[in-house]
Structure formats: C-alpha cells, structure tokens
Image (cartoon, rainbow, N blue to C red):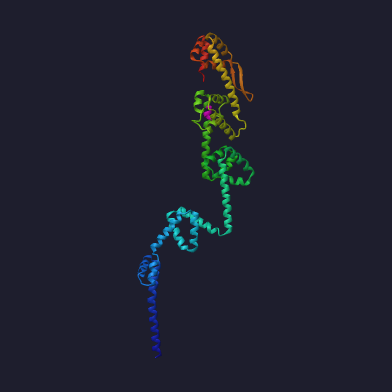
Amino acid sequence: MENVEVIKNKKGKAKRFIIAILIIIPILVLSLLYFNNKTFKLKVNSLLAKVPGGVGDYFRTTPTELEREDKKVYLADYYLSLDPVNAADKLYIIKKDDEKLYSEIIRLMNSNSPTKTSEIIKNIRNLELRKDLLFSIYDEIQEEKANQFLNEVSRLESQDLLITINEIKNRYEREADFKETLPQMLSQMNEDRLTDILFYIDDSLREELLNKFNIDLRTKLDNKLSTKKFKRNNLMDLAHLYEVKPLEEVLEEIGNSDKYSFEELGTIYKNLSIIKSAEIFSEIEDDSFKEQLFAAIRKEEELVGEENSITNDISRAIQFLTEYNKKIDDLVKLYNRMSPDKAAKVVEKMLANENTVTALEINSEPIYEISDATIIVDVLSRMNNKNLSSIMDNMNTENASKLTQLLAKP
C-alpha cells in the first residue's frame, strides 16, 4: 500500500512539474518577444488596451513605440537647435538619469549633424571633468595661456613689419620662453606675412626658424621666399633699365602708382642713381605721391638694414635741379630775345667749353657735373623750333652737326 501511495505522489509531482513547465516556458518566450520584438510588443499593447478595467486604462495611456521615437527625434532636433554649451548642459542632466535615453538621442543627433553633435559631446565631457576641481583649474589656466598665445600672434602679425622683425631679433636672444614658442607662433600667422618676416630677417635666424617648421610649411615658405627674391631681383633689373630710359617714358611708368605698388616703387627707386631719382621727383607734381614714395624708399632701406637713407641725398639733388632748371628757363627767355647771329656766337663758344663750372656733390663725390656745353644744350632743347633753327643757321657746319647730335640724346 505504501508503494502505491509513493507512486501516486510521484505521478502527482510529475504532472505538476509538467504543467508548470508548460506555463512558464510560454510566459518566458512571450516575455522575451515582448521586450525584444517591437512589432510583437505593439500588438500586445494594442490588445491589452482593449481589456476593460485598470489594465486596459494603463495600456491605453502608455505611449506607443512610434510615439516614443517621435519624441526622441523631436528632442534630438531641439538640442541641435540650441547653442552647443546650452545643449550640453541639458543633455548632461539626461545622461546622469538615463544613460540609454541619452545614447539614443545622441545617435539621432549624430545622424543629422555629426559636427555639431561632436562639439556638444565635447562640452558634455568638459562638464563631467569640471566635477574634478583639478581638471577645472587646469582647463582655465590652459585657456588663459591659449588666449595669451593667440593675442601675441595677432599683435606680431598686425603691427608694422619692421617693428615685428626688430622685436623678434631682440627677444629671440634674450628670452628663453619666447625663443621656444616663436616657431609655433609664426606657424599660426598668415603665410604671406610670415614670408615677409623671414625674407628680411637675418640669414642665420631665418634658417634656424625654417628648420623648426614641419616639412609641409617649410616647403611652402621656401617656395614663397624664392618667388619673393625673384620678384625683388626683377625690380632691381627694372631700375637699371629705367636709369637709361628717357625721362618722359620713366615718368609714365614709375611717376605714379598705376603700374607698381609703393612697396615695389620703393625697391625700384632705391636702386636708381640719386640724380635719376631727383630728375623724376622734380617732374612729379603730386606732393602726396612723393611723400608716400619717400616713405616707401625709407622703409625698404630699413628692412634691408641700411642706416644711411638716400632720401636726404635725393632731396638735395631735387633742390639742386630745381634751382638749375629755373636758371635754364631764365636763359631760354634771354636767348629767345637775342638776334640769331649773336646767339649763335655765344652757343658756339659755350659748346667748346666742357670744363665743369658747377657740380652737385654727395659725400664729397660729384654726382652731377655741369659745364657751359651742358647749360647751352639744355637751354636750346627748351627753345621753340623756329628760334632754334635760326640760331643753327648762323653756326658753322661742324658746330651745328655737333649740336644736333647733343640735342638728340635722351
């Protein structure tokens, strides 16, 4: 009898176990489907919402998955519309409370605007770091240093080129910190401005600085420096060409700023002779242009390190030529009133005298010598053709031929 009871108990337990398994497994499967399959979850929620009573009310008021996604999209768009700092403040709060929701919103934001999302995430990271006072103080110091660095770069870049060059030369030798940071500061500058600085700085310092730049920047700067040197040499060659050109042609090309910049004109005039520059200046009527041109010449001299300026010598030569030309104009009036035969005798006498009667000296060296022959040729070159022809008709053939050749010279 006892065995029968035992067998019955065992059978009862087995039935209960099987029933439990049959109930639990479907529940587990359905639960897994519910929480991992959005389509299945939506259908179940829809069915349960129809159940009367509290259960139905709960599922009727529970947001659908579509509604939840719509809200996430809305939030993502909203945070992207905010200032990055403001958006970071709000998302930082969400991240602390619901990491999963935060990740989903960030994912949606990133799909719309990766750049701005990256900036916002960076700001959130900074907010997290600020919880550590050490990080906070460190960041503030680094920001202050960065601002000081950029201000220094801006100042060196915007102030007068010569002032910047002199400051770099002086501080590079005296200040260890400046020497260490200078290459980095220069690398932040506009490349054309940096080229100008390196072009006019000492050769040894230029090479030392170039060696501290990365290969790409070094290559660019080498090319720009070569181009600038080529252009400068070309301007110097042009100066030699203008030296022998007739004054009228020279005035048309370098007597104004139509063809060349003042920087270029400064290089050209610096390489002209004193007397040629003075002749050109004497014919220019625009005082403002002359002042700017003088300033450009002085700047070019200072940049290449020349202490003595030729502008003072040019000014002296201009004054000399101005006084000389006034005397020539007075003589033109005098010879126009003289009879042709009398004027011819004076002309022949003066043509024969090529000894210097006066000269313009610069640094004890004569740079412009004037003889009687020079004076009379200048006088006759300014007379009207009728009076000039009458005078030449009264000269002997040899002197008339000589005068013709002298008048034909530029």
In the depicted structure, whether residue 46 falls above or below residue 399: below
In the depicted structure, whether residue 54 falls above or below residue 177: below
What residue appears at the point 39 percent right and 67 percent down from the top-left corner?
61
What residue appears at the point 58 percent right and 15 percent down from the top-left corner?
372
Q: Is residue 229 visible?
A: yes
Camera-side residue of 276 and 336: 336
In the depicted structure, whether residue 6 falls above or below residue 342: below
Camera-side residue of 48 and 409: 48
Q: Position of residue 51 (x, y in %)?
A: 35, 71
Magenta stretch contains residue 239: yes
Q: Quadrant of residue 354?
A: top right
Q: Position of residue 242 (x, y in %)?
A: 52, 26
Bounds of the magenta span?
Answer: 236-240
Q: Could you tell whether 328 is left or right of 33 in the image?
A: right
Camera-side residue of 330 and 146: 330
Residue lying at the far bottom in this picture: please name it. Answer: 1
Q: Position of residue 383 (x, y in %)?
A: 51, 15
What residue appears at the point 50 percent right and 23 percent down from the top-left corner?
248
Q: Is residue 29 visible?
A: no
Dominant secondary structure of the residues highlighted in magenta in the image: helix
Q: Could you tell whether 118 is left or right of 37 in the image?
A: right
Tell me the quarter of the image containing the N terminus. Answer: bottom left
Q: Position of residue 44 (x, y in %)?
A: 36, 69
Magenta stretch contains residue 97: no
What residue appears at the point 58 percent right and 50 percent down from the top-left corner?
145
Looking at the image, how many numbered discs can be counted on the residues?
0
